[in-house]
Image (cartoon, coloured by chain):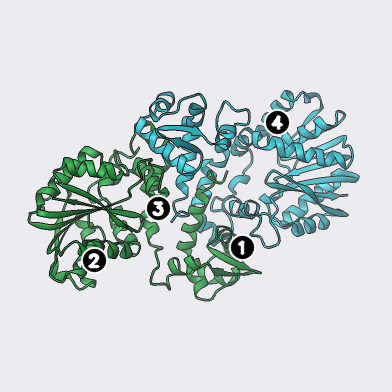
Chain colours: A green, B cyan
């Protein structure tokens, strides 16, 4: 019963973020009446929503007063620099919801019920991704950049499906001589460009707009970042793509593959393994690949050695393939 | 993040029930390929869905073989007499989903964004309720009927918003002289009538079709069942309605109110308290009422004494009001 009704948690969180309930409480409004006034809502509606959020651990209720749980204060209040509420624009984008709503059809077909799903050219949902997911990715990007810096300095860096650009920007901040070449759809690269300016590395930031399968990457790269990209495609397509990455690297160059990597059992760890269903719902033939599969894809593409790096990159892992 | 993505659990369960994945496994199909063949689906899609169901505890995976967790075998396989999969037709009815999807609007208004919501006359979703929820209600109805029988035999019984009719039918099975008068929309009473026939009590089963607020109940009842009804309305409407129930009872007669009853804190127990949000999403002014509120409603309607009966009636509780 709780799994069947789980969607109400999604709707409640979405409504609370949209109405700025968490921010209202952080500002000092602690009763249903005062929160309602701040959020331009009905006291009765706020009381029912806040009770639900309390039941699920996002708020704490004492008498008729609500307070933020620690995680809510950190991530869901706009007063917090770690606010991640904008991630809902991507995570709950209508097209992604629709793909999941048509899951039985996707299971029958073995791929999304939405045609090309999220892979359509210039799909505006990737702009939402770039905007909304950036706050969630700062720390993972920093961990990845530190780990890669430990393996040697990279001066020419290709950032594939750059999105918000935060992974490439983190590498540029670790190496003051590094130049980043960011590949993504033109509309998405506008966000990455803004972030490169904000990070003070715009003079070392170069754009490669278009489909990553079609654009000319050029060559001579020390490092290629392939972050949260391969899971959108089937394994043969990944191999073809990694061959193109291999060709763009210098001898001795590295491809850094950042991915949800389930264990060989495909049911652990939970968040990485569960991501496979999102790919079923939203792409024609994507999947969450195990390390053995990523190793095989990379070796088939010509890479000499493939390593599973130790640190967790948020919910992702880092796989390094050496040319 | 898991709360935001919780809707995928709903979609996965809905898809698995629709595709009969649990039944397929109960029939002895244990690999993605054989389950897929039985369910007319793609092996790849079944594998991704079954892995997700494993992560959430509904299946057990060993190597490439899937088995049913105990609860799944009991409640989600059509081979089980306790199968409850049809409950999804009501619990995930599109209109209820839409009310929840428009939750921010409901919080702003203090009531459903869907006009009359689930309260429209002859709403076909109540036929889905009557069909789908019956298997879940047999045991609670039996517990309620046993508890009420302990307080004395009832010969003339009013069953308000009878739905599947199971509560009234359980009372009739406990007292071979009892006659049941079932009130509900005409389309819903067709389901209750079928169930009364199946239970062998059709000769003691009488119909009162129409709005419970408008239909003439008659009088002289020993017992009135008010099961999962009051939560759809605001407290003044409940009081007005209970006055009508009071008038239909004999002196000394009882009203048995079966409801989700949250504690005074309104955030426990979790399932009863969380039900309040469903009423916000789907009704203009419904709520889950505390015992103190139900007591006050009943006393304002003229009842002399109100008791909180001990047993849990499924996720509901039983409140007995005495004329």
Q: Are marks 3 and 2 on the same chain?
A: yes
Task: Point out the tag, 3 or 2, that comes first from the N-terminus.
Answer: 3
CA neighbours of label 2 inside 10 A, class few (<14), some (14 to 19), many (20+): many
Give the percent coordinates (x, y) of residue A57.
55, 60
CA neighbours of label 1 inside 10 A, class few (<14), some (14 to 19), many (20+): many
The span from disc 4 to disc 2 (Cα, nearest Å) is: 65 Å
Residue beneath label 1, please?
A44
Pointer 4 chain: B
Residue A170: assigned label: 2
The span from disc 3 to disc 2 (Cα, nearest Å) is: 27 Å
Residue beneath label 4, please?
B192
Name the side, left or right, on which B32 lies relative to B210: left
> Is the Cβ of the residue at disc 3 closer than 8 Å to that at disc 1?
no
Name the side, left or right, on which A202 lies relative to B26: left
Which quadrant of the view contains residue B134? top right
Q: Residue at x 60, y 28 (%)?
A: B80
The span from disc 4 to disc 1 (Cα, nearest Å) is: 35 Å
The span from disc 3 to disc 1 (Cα, nearest Å) is: 26 Å
**Is residue A50 placed above or below B89 in the rendered structure?**
below
Can residue A191 be spotted in the picture? no
The span from disc 3 to disc 4 (Cα, nearest Å) is: 40 Å
Q: Are marks 2 and 1 on the same chain?
A: yes
Task: Point out the tag, 3 or 1, that comes first from the N-terminus.
Answer: 1
Name the side, left or right, on which B220 lies relative to A281: right
The span from disc 2 to disc 1 (Cα, nearest Å) is: 46 Å
Give the percent coordinates (x, y) of residue B67.
49, 32
């Amino acid at each position: 019963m709780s799994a069947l009704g789980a969607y109400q948690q999604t709707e409640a969180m979405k409504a609370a973020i949209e109405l700025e309930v968490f921010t209202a409480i952080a500002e000092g409004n602690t009763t249903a009446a005062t929160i309602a006034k701040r959020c331009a809502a009905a006291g009765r509606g706020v009381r029912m929503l806040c009770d639900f959020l309390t039941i699920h651990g996002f708020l704490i209720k004492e008498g008729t007063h609500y307070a933020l749980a620690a995680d809510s204060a950190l991530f869901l209040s706009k007063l917090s620099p770690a606010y991640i509420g904008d991630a809902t624009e991507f995570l709950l984008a209508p097209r992604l919801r629709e793909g999941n709503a048509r899951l039985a059809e996707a299971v029958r077909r073995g791929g999304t019920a939405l045609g090309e799903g999220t892979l359509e050219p210039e799909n505006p949902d990737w702009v939402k991704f770039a905007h909304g997911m950036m706050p969630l990715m700062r720390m993972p990007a920093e961990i990845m950049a530190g780990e890669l810096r430990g393996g040697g300095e990279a001066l020419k860096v290709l950032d594939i499906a750059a999105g918000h650009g935060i992974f490439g920007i983190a590498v540029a901040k670790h190496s003051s001589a590094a130049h980043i070449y960011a590949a993504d759809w033109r509309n998405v690269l506008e966000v990455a460009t803004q972030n490169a300016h904000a990070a003070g590395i715009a003079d070392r930031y170069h754009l490669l707009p278009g489909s990553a399968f079609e654009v000319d990457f050029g060559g001579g790269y020390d490092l290629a970042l392939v972050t949260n990209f391969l899971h959108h495609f089937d394994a043969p397509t990944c191999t073809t793509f990694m061959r193109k990455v291999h060709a763009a690297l210098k001898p001795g160059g590295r491809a850094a593959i950042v991915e949800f990597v389930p264990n060989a059992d495909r049911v652990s760890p939970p968040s990485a393994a569960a991501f496979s269903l999102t790919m079923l719902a939203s792409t024609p033939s994507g999947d969450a690949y195990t390390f053995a599969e990523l190793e095989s894809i990379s070796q088939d593409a010509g890479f000499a050695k493939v390593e599973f790096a130790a640190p967790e990159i948020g919910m992702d892992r880092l796989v390094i393939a050496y040319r």
